[in-house]
Amino acid sequence: MALPTPLNGQITDAVTQSNVKVLGDAPAMAMGAVYQSLAHSTGILYENAVAQQQQNAVCAQASTNQGVIQIYSVNTMAGAVATTKIGQSDTPETLMTLVTALKAVGGGGGVS
């Protein structure tokens, strides 16, 4: 019990005991706050992991789509490359010379 004061001894004891209770509960409350913060951080971590997996899935689908488009356009691209190479070489002039020579000989076969 506290020292004698002009207040009732029961009041001072109640206040003292409640102060001791608050001080005694402080470590438990602090650890509760730490655990709650840890749980919240872990939840955010998992949310970010799921969002990253979703983004990876979208990127995988897009790259697969581009790969399929390239596979289907192989013949078209090969034709375009071959046409470009022929257009940039002297092959058209050589072919025209050959056609002209065949017409002169008379073996043009209907080539105009």
Image (cartoon, helix red, strand yellow):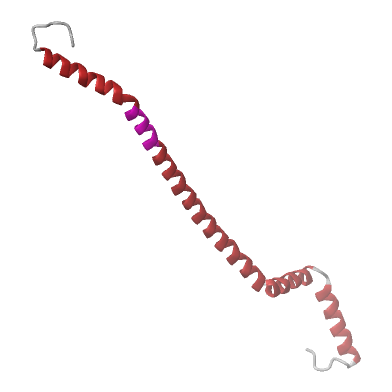
User: Does residue 21 appear to the left or right of 95 in the view shown?
Assistant: left
For the point 74% across and 73% down, the residue is 83
- Note whether 82 is above or below 112 in the view shown: above
Q: State the image coordinates of residue 30 (x, y, percent, origin top left).
A: 35, 28
- Note whether 91 is above or below 108 in the view shown: above
Q: State the image coordinates of residue 104 (x, y, percent, origin top left).
A: 89, 89
Could you say which is closer to the camera, residue 29 or residue 8? 8
In the rendered image, residue 60 lying in the magenta stretch gets the answer no
User: Does residue 88 appear to the left or right of 25 in the view shown?
Assistant: right
Could you say which is closer to the camera, residue 98 or residue 104? 98
For the point 71% across and 72% down, the residue is 80
User: Does residue 73 appear to the left or right of 93 in the view shown?
Assistant: left
Image quadrant where residue 99 sits: bottom right
Main SS of the magenta part reads: helix
In magenta, the rendered stretch is 28-37
User: Does residue 54 appear to the left or right of 33 in the view shown?
Assistant: right
Quick one: quadrant of the N terminus?
Answer: top left
In the rendered image, residue 35 lying in the magenta stretch gets the answer yes
Image quadrant where residue 41 sits: top left
For the point 47% across and 52% down, the residue is 50
- Note whether 107 is above or below 79 in the view shown: below
- Note whether 26 is above or below 86 in the view shown: above
Image quadrant where residue 90 sits: bottom right
For the point 80% across and 90% down, the residue is 111
